[in-house]
Amino acid sequence: MALFITFEGGEGSGKTVQARALHRKLVRLNLPVVFVYEPGGTSLGRRIARWLKWAQGSEMSPLSELLLFNASRAQLVAEVIRPGLLNDKIVICDRYTDSTVIYQGYGRGLDMELVRIINGAATDGLTPDLTVLLDVSVEEGFARKGARARDRFEQEGVVFHQRVREGYLRLAQAEPERWLVIDGCQSRKKIAQIVWARVSQLLGGVGMGGA
Ligand code: TMP
């Protein structure tokens, strides 16, 4: 059964850990599942991701950022996500169009209508069935990241990341049937159980024996 699930959240929210845990669970159940992430997920996307996260020297304009994220996304949708769904697979994507609404729209201040138009063009309007939001405070997220090297987004100030957090909560509130908002301060196991409860429901009760 085709199902498109995305994971979203600010820096250090734990979304990647949970997206991967769900992937492992579905593999264990022998269900056809594909795991991808943004930016990246294809050979072209990985090259674009390197610029987006680590470009130094020249300032990248917010519009360039918007277009590059969507160039990576258009390739990922065409090469992996759409074919996967057409083949009745469950596709899990770590970040998707909502990240652009949040980071380039709320974060960088680009016109929201423009962001939606470009996102829509890159995906041909493909929307997730379920989006899981891991919500943690900006302080907690950065504390988890520790001292490792910070990419262009992680180097942004607290105010930027506060806009990211608030933007996510606002988006989720506006479309509650698509979003599952989870307090990211709970244990990994507990969060995985909450995610699994919703996913197994969408899959018609498969593997309800716990996370
Ligand atoms: P991460 O998911 O590995 O943390 O890194 C991706 C970074 O890129 C993260 O800081 C969010 C940012 N981003 C955007 O600004 N817009 C987007 O559309 C996507 C997919 C990610």
Image: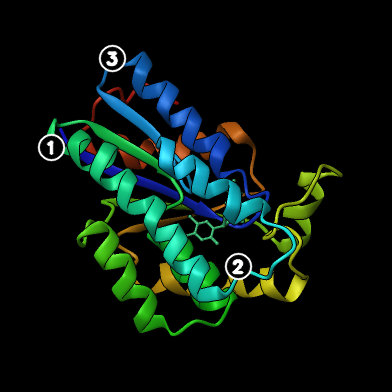
SS for dot 1: helix
Return the x and y of residue 173 as percentages of the image width and height: 41, 72
Residue sitting nearer the eye, 75 or 171: 75
The verdict on label 3 being within 8 Å of ligand 1 is: no
Near mark 2 (Cα within 10 A), the count class, few <14, some 14-19 or many ≥20, is many
Whether residue 187 sits left or right of residue 18 in the image: it is right
Return the x and y of residue 93 as percentages of the image width and height: 39, 42
SS for dot 2: helix
The verdict on label 2 being within 8 Å of ligand 1 is: no
SS for dot 3: loop
Which residue is under mark 1?
86
Whether residue 1 sits left or right of residue 76 in the image: it is left
Q: Quadrant of residue 186?
A: top right
Near mark 3 (Cα within 10 A), the count class, few <14, some 14-19 or many ≥20, is few
Res 102 seen here = no
Measured in 3D between alpha carbons, the distance from the residue under mark 1 to the one under mark 3, in whole angstroms, is 18 Å
Whether residue 69 sits left or right of residue 27 in the image: it is right
State which image quarter holds ligand 1.
Answer: bottom right
In the image, what residue occupies the spot 26% across and 20% down?
Answer: 31
How is this picture coloured?
rainbow
In the image, what residue occupies the spot 55% across and 82% down?
Answer: 109
Residue sitting nearer the eye, 149 or 210: 149
Q: Quadrant of residue 144?
A: top right
Q: Can you tell which of label 1 and label 3 is closer to the viewer? A: 1
For badge 3, the amino acid type reads: Asn
- Vertical position of residue 123 compared to residue 121: above or below: above
Measured in 3D between alpha carbons, the distance from the residue under mark 1 to the one under mark 2, in whole angstroms, is 33 Å
Which residue is under mark 2?
165
For badge 1, the amino acid type reads: Leu
Which residue is under mark 3?
30
Counting residues from the start of the chain, the first of labels 1 and 3 encountered is 3
